[in-house]
Amino acid sequence: MLATRRHFLAASGSTLALATPATAQDIQSLTLATAWPRGAPGVGVNAERFARRVEALSGGRLSIRLFGAGELVPAFEVLDAVQRGTADLGHGTAYYWSGKQQALHYFTGVPFGLTAVEFVAWLRFGGGQALWDKVMAPFGVVPFYAGSSGPQAGGWFRREITSPEDFLGLKFRIAGLGAQVLRRMGTTTVTTPPGEIYGALASGAVDGADWVGPWNDIAFGLHKVAPYYYLPGFHEPGPGLEILVNRKRFEGLAPDLQEVLRSAAEATALETLADFTYHNIRTFAELETTYGVTPRHFPPAVIERLAAESRAVLKALAQRNSLTAKVWESYGAFLDQARAYAPFSELGSLATREAAGSMVRKD
């Protein structure tokens, strides 16, 4: 009993020590480069919350200086910065670096793929995280999941989309595998950094643009420069965000500070999805009344063509190298199981709720 009491007191003392404000010599400063404009809804704000959470959980032993896109490095050079050690951490999304390794597409979004909840289930319990670690190992970077926006919108267009042929000759801002699919439909795609999307649409440099969803799209003013808004998108049903950590910097931290980064990323992941879900729902309710936007679905013929081209893109992607094939084998197998379960879980539940209509709100 005495030994147990001593162990408890020792543990309690250790806990109290962690809560004590760090002295100047104890503080380790880290830099965080993001792919988003500073303060951007959802993405930029939750990167800032991650930084504050790390500082709080570490008792001030870790101090993070955050840089928005273009402040330290351009948006699409965040991985390079973390790899070189120019930044200790990065906040972005994996397909921004897919030019270096095509397998990274699976860790952002796959056309007609896993939802946000299914994706994190695959990461945590289906072997996805181990594969992600393996993909990022050659870059000297440790990846952590940092949440999702939920289903992406299909995008804003200057003209109505009534058939697959309407994509022919279109110049459209989109990233990832969705861009590869649209190129097969005759679209010219560009990967404009987030902070430049509005300007590209306003100037006519592009005929349409995909960004995120109602909350971000309205905040970026895209409704002011393109009248046709299609939801949902086909390309990213549950896109993943990430925290990247320079491996040498990470391994140089004490084990408890490594856990601070890991736990802060997990907490940020939950908060990020909740943040996007809440604000997308609230913004969607105001699309027509406040912003004069009528949301539209892609016609069935368009979905059918997008699905056919997506199959071709995914088949070609899996053949790039043995690593992409291995990731797709794992991701695809879980996707098949998720699709079989969906009619009896989320999909079925939503259909049941829709069938009930407003009855549950009536007296």
Image (cartoon, grey):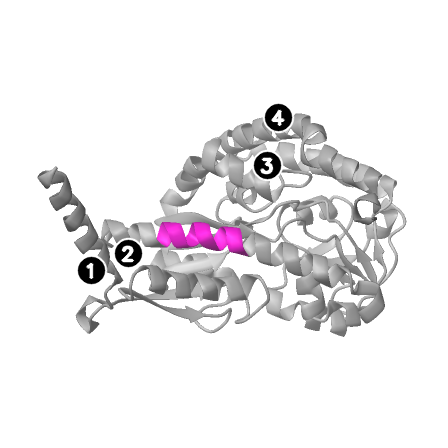
For residue 317, the mark is: 3
Mark closest to the chain's N terminus, 3 or 2: 2
Mark 4–mark 3 Cα distance, whole angstroms, equals 21 Å
Q: Name the residue under label 4.
A: 337
Q: Is 101 in the magenta?
A: no
Magenta highlight range? 261-271
Q: Mark 1 points at which residue?
A: 17
Q: Nearer the viewer, residue 217 or 286?
A: 286
Determine the main secondary structure of the stretch shown in magenta.
helix
Q: Which of 360 and 294 is in front in this view?
A: 360
Q: Is there a contact, CB below 8 Å, between mark 3 and mark 2? A: no
Q: How crowded is mark 1: few (under 14 residues within 10 Å), some or many (20 or more)?
A: few
**First of labels 4, 3 by sequence position:** 3
Query: Which element is circle 4 on?
Result: helix
Q: Disc 3 residue type?
A: Leu
Q: Report the residue at 35% width, 64% height from top.
A: 56
Q: Earlier in the sequence, mark 1 or mark 2?
A: 1
Q: What residue type is labelled 1?
A: Ala
Query: Which one is closest to the eye, mark 3 or mark 2?
Result: 2
Disc 1/disc 2 C-alpha distance (Å): 23 Å
Front-most of residues 156 and 322: 156
Distance, label 1 to label 4, CA atoms, is 47 Å
Whichever of labels 4 and 2 marks the residue nearer the N terminus, that label is 2
